[in-house]
Amino acid sequence: MTTIEAATTPAQLVYGQRRRGTGQATVLYDALGPRGRRRATIFAILFSVLLVAFIAYTVYRLGQFGHLEAARWSYVFSPEILRYLGEGLLNNVKASVVAGVLALVLGLFLALGRLSTAAPVRVVSVGWIEFFRGFPLIMLILIPYLLFPVYLKALPPLWYVVIGLTLYNSAVMAEIYRAGILSLDRGQFEAASSIGLRRGQAMRLVVLPQAIRRMVPLLLTQLVILFKDSTLGVAVTYPEMLRRGETMGSFEPRVVFEAMIVTALLFLGVGLLLSRTVAFVEYRQRRKSRAAPLR
């Protein structure tokens, strides 16, 4: 009898309960007994009541300050304002795409450098990764913004955002690549060397394609985070959507709050769309891995 079949004691382990449709066991912990389920139900009801009360009180206070007036929301949802905010969203996408491509490429080289047998290359790669991964992202955007006009040449605000996002995310993605490479069995290198491939050829032709395929969901997740971080361009006057939501107060101060709500909803919608894309890619990869024949 297998472990999963044997997990049928009164304190049944959830380890023995497979997730529906996946065939994979969940995290190991004891299932709740009757008393525990009653307590969980009571806490869930109390939390729901408090949440509903908080939402009702918030709506009441917003109404007191006039934030529920139809005139304000009709103004924010007018075609001109939505177009104004949509252009800011496109600027977020532009910065995210440029920085994402640069970070993916640079991160791959940094991961290969960290795994290199050459000590100088490895030291430089490790230093880059550890330094920029631990550096606050907002400072990576502000420092070029403050120093370039003084010591080099002033750049459009887009490039300050791209520089900061690229430096930070290249370090994070390098670790994702490295984790994917190290997750493969060492027999991949041995099999490649047995047919006459050098280490570099084995890495390029055998190991990297498998590692990148395995790390695609994590890389996409990091790109979603990068898109959300592009809102930090507000610190360098980059006209992204959050910046445009703020500047609406300069010509209609009464709708700043409403503009921020609409901006947040737009970001939420794009974030949910990207998250569902990541989940779909992960699901397809899981199906392919289960359908792959054993060798």
Image: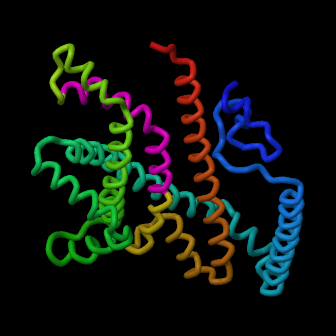
Q: Please say if 149 is above or below 167.
A: below
| Left/right of residue 147 with respect to residue 80 in the rendered view | left
Q: Residue at x 55, y 36 (%)?
A: 282
Quarter in which the N terminus is drawn? top right
On the image, the x and y values in percent for residue 223 come to: 45, 50
Residue closer to the observer: 155 or 109 = 109
| Left/right of residue 212 with respect to residue 50 in the rendered view | left
Q: Please say if 249 is above or below 268.
A: below
On the image, the x and y values in percent for residue 250 come to: 55, 82
Residue closer to the observer: 73 or 130 = 130
Membership of 221 in magenta stretch: yes
Report the number of discs.
Answer: 0
Q: Quadrant of residue 163?
A: bottom left
Residue closer to the observer: 174 or 188 = 188
Q: Residue at x 51, y 13 (%)?
A: 293
Q: Quadrant of residue 168?
A: bottom left
Q: Please say if 170 is above or below 262.
A: above
| Left/right of residue 234 with respect to residue 40 in the rendered view | left
Quarter in which the C terminus is drawn? top left
Membership of 212 in magenta stretch: yes
**Magenta segment:** 201-227
Q: Residue at x 32, y 53 (%)?
A: 170
On the image, the x and y values in percent for residue 204 come to: 25, 28
Q: Name the colour scheme.
A: rainbow
